[in-house]
Image: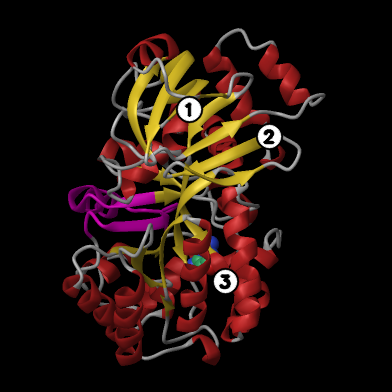
Amino acid sequence: MTLYRATFLHTPANPFQFAQALQIEDDGGLLVQNGQIIQSGSFADVRAAFPDEPVEDLRGGLLLPGFIDTHVHFPQVRVIGGLGLPLLEWLDTITLPEEAKFGDDAYAAAVAREFVAGLTSNGTTTALVFGSHFASAVDILFQESSRVGLRAVAGQVVSDRMLRSELHTTPQRAYEEGKALIGRWHGQGRNLYAVTPRFSLSASEGILDACAALMAEFPGVRFTSHINENGREIETVRELFPESRDYLDTYERAGLITRRSVLAHSVHPTDRELGAMAEHRCTAAHCPCSNSALGSGMFPLKRHLAAGVHVSLGTDVGGGTGFSMLKEGLQAHFMQQLMGLEGVPLSPAHLLYLATRAGAEALQLEDQIGDFSAGKNFDAVYFCPPEGSIMKTVLAHATSTERALASVFAGGTQGDVAQVWIGGDSVYRRASS
Ligand code: GUN
Ligand code: ZN
């Protein structure tokens, strides 16, 4: 057992619904046994209950629940930051040529190491991952997440039209390879499987039906795809699915929209789509850096919340700008500010919730991860800026812990992440700390 002593913050409740959702322990204690939090509270209280356990002193920074990135692409690490192109041009000229390289296992293995290290070194402990179109590259990704101990919810990306021939499969093969991958990886260690058609633009009805067959056969697997990201994409989907009422309906008709579904972007939804998303209790993964970089648009958070749609946060590497969930929180804040009356003012509590607990809820893992309540796994990120950095100065002079949290989102980077734990295991430690 270890007693962690730290200033910790978490959001066991949803700040979009409850006023006092941000819980702060300025001198907190978390008693961890076998990776699980046994007691959570003030250091004095936990110490009194466990007077003899060894203490790990993490004072001087902030301890936060591990970040949960609900939209990130494994094969796009090396093309992060291709600024200036709209979605379909960016896919054709930058991204799909890169993804075609993942038929080479050695290439996939090298990027898998970069990808998982990119997540953990930024404090991300759970990720909903778009894998590769190549099944063997998905095996390689799961091997690496297992080696490191990341919680990966990932799947083979499937498409059968309009990309490039190397990335196309058939409904039968998508079903068979998906089934085999589920058998090998779903529920193995910390891994879970997510059925992942790329988007309706690159999916025939046949392949969506193959995805639905997997979802029906394996009730524990999750589902993810893209939706309503870009005007030209939406127009093309409309032409490809003349029978469908809208973009959501292309998935809905196949039976793919449920509580297990996470749909990335949702920048341009209709009111009908929002109502149906709320009814099916699926999640919209908001990716503000990507929406800015690809010029996709301003995420209508207010409309999602008004309709009752659950919203989480994702980096969308490599349409996004990197693995930092702090940066996503900041960009979400910026964009809502710029939307004026159409925007939702986001407090530090909202940002922390979106980066942590909201993702756990999206993945139906909120009984296991997402906050520091007793019974949860000890998935944590210790944010402690290096000596001499401006962030160190800012934290030292913060007038409250809540203001410090705002500053962490405003200016925090990978270099400020001192240590990261998943299920009590230390998975990352900054070299100099
Ligand atoms: N839509 C289909 N594929 C992609 C992708 O790789 N990134 C983003 N942002 N949108 C997509
Ligand atoms: Zn994406």
Q: CA distance from mark 3 to mark 1?
A: 31 Å
Marks 1 and 2 close (CB-CB < 8 Å): no
Say whether disc 1 or disc 2 marks the residue closer to the N-terminus.
1
Q: Is residue 423 located in the magenta-colored stretch of the structure? A: no
**Marks 1 and 2: which is nearer the front?**
2
Rendering coords of residue 209 (x, y %): 24, 80
Q: Is residue 56 above or below residue 367?
A: above
Residue 131: x percent and y percent?
A: 48, 70
Q: Is residue 279 magenta?
A: yes
Amino acid, disc 1: Leu
Front one among 291 and 11: 11
* Lower position in the chain sequence, tag 3 or tag 2: 3
x 35%, y 90%: residue: 173
Measured as percent of width and height from the top left, residue 220 is found at 22, 62
Q: Which mark is residue 346?
A: 1
* Mark number displayed over residue 416: 2
Q: Is residue 320 visible?
A: no
Characterize the local packing of mark 1: few (<14), some (14-19) or many (20 or more) Cα atoms within 10 angstroms.
Answer: many
Q: Secondary structure at mark 3?
A: helix
Inspect the image, locate mark 3, and give the three-letter code of the amino acid beneath it: Leu
